[in-house]
């Protein structure tokens, strides 16, 4: 047999996986947070209780999972809560958060920027402005450098 | 505080001699310039040109008067002053990547070199063969070592690296020194032993510093945060997020006060009083109260006409440094009570800052209030209130 008809299956092997010096990210085996429960914030929005909906939506951020579905779901819920706020109430909502809360809010805002829809960018920009006033450049840097994305 | 501009090139690193009359700097090239202080400023007296790569670290040992330099050409040289000229001696560091930082130990019998080869090279002089030898610390380091600092006991070494961890190793070399006593960081300290590994500092650990007693370790990382590990308190770590751009360099100026500076072009003071108690104190660069409010109406319209802007010329930052600060260094005072520290930055400037513990406001700000009632001018500064009668 000619050499060129031999198996070329070796070409599909990813040799970087076998590199002994490969940098393996140490993932902590932390408890998997499943993201906020969808029903509760929606219910609260219908009732008009925006602040509680806001805080509930920001609970249990899915930072430790790699499950894209969970993250998408959490993002959708938070986005819905953020868009249903009135512009004048945004500032009070941001003030009610602590440092970690502001960082988490920034992560969701930038996640929202990734896939802009009709009106979402306008609202998100308003949220961004208020969150930036409280968190400063540091909160944006933390969104960019975070290993665990929301 | 005083500013001196060494030119247009960024200053990668700097080091002072013992009496602070000379400074060794590198203007982002493979050359080290040594400047001597004079009444009018600084005069260049020496140029050290042995490296072929960009110089990444300089340290000047005050007592033995030796300079160690390291560069991206994977070499380090130890320079000694002989008959008014600096003579280099090559150090065999045995690294296959660029060196990133270098520090003399407190007793100046060895120095530590961090590199991109994921290891730290601890080098000491062997008298028999008249050369510098090195021993490597590689344990668990997965990426470039970005910053180093020695513990006052001359044995422990803290390293911050790009794998987001900060670690404390023992760099005890039994050929040249005696066994160290136990410390709050640990009792058994063979060479290369890791006494602390804090995983996930949030970002690359750019700067690291031991407190004057060595009991605490502070670091700054790229996710705009500052952290402190407290050895006597069970090595507990306290982290504080910062609202500014990431900090690049950190320095303990007393047992509880920390100064850090970085991409925000301004040094900030933090205070650590115990586990869980790390707080921002103040910004150390208070912009002068310049005569900004002195624009007349004519000036205002002229600006509007010429530049379509109502603001004054905003080309400069209002901090002393016009670009990121890359390194902080103690200038005056013992480690436990620093009076002055210096900073160099990417704008080519070197600033010497005065530091006083416990002063709430900058004593230079003076408020002039004209009292119409009594036709007196009241001058108030935070230190004194005086009334000048008209």
Image (cartoon, coloured by chain):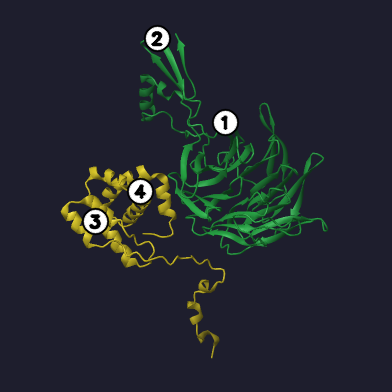
Chain colours: A yellow, B green
Query: Is A106 on the left or on the right of B320, as rendered?
Result: left
Marks 4 and 3 in Cβ contact (< 8 Å):
no
Q: Secondary structure at mark 3?
A: helix
How far across and down, in percent of the image, does residue B150 sit?
64, 51
Q: Secondary structure at mark 2?
A: loop
Q: Residues within 10 Å of mark 2 (few under 14, many from 20)?
A: few
- Mark 3 and mark 2, same subunit? no
In the picture of the structure, the residue carrying the numbered disc 1 is B1
Q: Residue furthest bottom?
A: A1
- Front residue of this view, candidates B263 and B108: B108
Query: Is A33 on the left or on the right of B105, as rendered?
Result: left
Q: Label 3 is found on which chain of the structure?
A: A
- Mark 4 and mark 2, same subunit? no
Q: Nearer the viewer, mark 4 or mark 3?
A: 4
Residue at x-position 58% and y-position 64%: B140
The answer to whether any part of residue B118 appears in the image is: no
Q: Against B388, is A81 above or below?
A: below
Q: Nearer the viewer, mark 1 or mark 2?
A: 2
In the picture of the structure, the residue carrying the numbered disc 2 is B375
Q: Earlier in the sequence, mark 4 or mark 3?
A: 3
The N terminus of chain B sits in image quarter: top right
Q: CA distance from mark 1 to mark 2?
A: 35 Å
In the picture of the structure, the residue carrying the numbered disc 3 is A80
In the picture of the structure, the residue carrying the numbered disc 4 is A98
Q: Earlier in the sequence, mark 1 or mark 2?
A: 1
Q: CA distance from mark 3 to mark 2?
A: 62 Å
Marks 3 and 1 in Cβ contact (< 8 Å):
no
């Amino acid at each position: 047999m000619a050499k060129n008809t031999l198996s070329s299956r070796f070409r599909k092997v990813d040799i970087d996986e076998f590199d002994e010096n490969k940098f393996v990210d140490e993932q902590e085996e932390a408890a998997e947070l499943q993201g906020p429960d969808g029903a509760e914030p929606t219910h609260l929005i219908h009732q008009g209780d925006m602040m509680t909906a806001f805080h509930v939506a920001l609970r249990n951020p899915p930072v430790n999972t790699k499950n894209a579905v969970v993250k998408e779901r959490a993002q959708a819920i938070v986005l819905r809560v953020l868009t249903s706020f009135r512009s004048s109430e945004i500032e009070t909502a941001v003030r009610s958060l602590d440092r970690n809360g502001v960082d988490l809010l920034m992560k969701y805002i930038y996640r929202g920027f990734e896939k802009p829809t009709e009106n979402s960018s306008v609202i998100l920009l308003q949220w961004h402005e208020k969150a930036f006033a409280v968190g400063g450049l540091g909160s944006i840097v933390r969104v960019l450098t975070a290993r665990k994305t929301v | 505080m005083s500013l001196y501009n060494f030119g247009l090139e960024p200053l990668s690193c700097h080091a002072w001699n013992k009496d602070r009359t000379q400074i060794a700097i590198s203007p982002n090239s493979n050359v080290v310039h040594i400047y001597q202080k004079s009444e009018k400023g600084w005069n260049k007296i020496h140029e050290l040109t042995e490296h072929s790569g960009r110089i990444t670290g300089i340290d000047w040992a005050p007592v033995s008067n030796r300079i160690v330099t390291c560069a991206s050409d994977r070499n380090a040289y130890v320079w000694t002053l002989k008959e008014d000229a600096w003579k280099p001696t090559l150090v065999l560091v045995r690294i296959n990547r660029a060196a990133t930082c270098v520090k003399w130990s407190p007793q100046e019998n060895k120095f530590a070199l961090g590199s991109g080869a994921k290891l730290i090279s601890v080098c000491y002089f062997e008298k028999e063969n008249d050369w510098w030898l090195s021993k490597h610390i590689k344990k668990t380091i997965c990426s470039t070592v970005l910053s180093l600092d020695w513990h006052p006991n001359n044995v422990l070494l803290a390293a911050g690296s790009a794998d987001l961890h900060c670690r404390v190793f023992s760099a005890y070399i039994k050929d040249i020194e005696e066994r160290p006593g136990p410390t709050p960081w640990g009792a058994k300290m063979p060479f290369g032993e890791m006494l602390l590994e804090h995983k996930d500092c949030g970002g690359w650990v750019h700067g690291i510093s031991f407190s004057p007693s060595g009991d605490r370790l502070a670091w700054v990382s790229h996710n705009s945060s500052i952290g402190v590990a407290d050895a006597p308190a069970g090595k507990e770590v306290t982290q504080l997020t910062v609202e500014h751009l990431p900090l690049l360099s950190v320095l303990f100026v007393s047992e509880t006060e920390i100064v850090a500076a970085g991409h925000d072009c301004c040094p900030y003071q933090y205070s650590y009083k115990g586990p869980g108690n790390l707080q921002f104190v103040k910004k150390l660069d208070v912009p002068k109260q310049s005569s900004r409010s002195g624009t007349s109406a004519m000036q205002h319209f002229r600006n509007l006409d010429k530049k379509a802007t109502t603001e004054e010329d905003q080309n400069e930052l209002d901090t002393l440094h016009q670009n990121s600060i890359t390194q902080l260094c103690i200038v005056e005072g013992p480690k436990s009570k620093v009076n002055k520290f210096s900073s160099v930055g990417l704008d080519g400037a070197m600033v010497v800052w005065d530091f006083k513990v416990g002063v709430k406001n900058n004593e230079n700000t003076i408020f002039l209030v004209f009292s119409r009632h009594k036709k007196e001018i009241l001058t108030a500064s935070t230190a004194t209130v005086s009334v000048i009668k008209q």
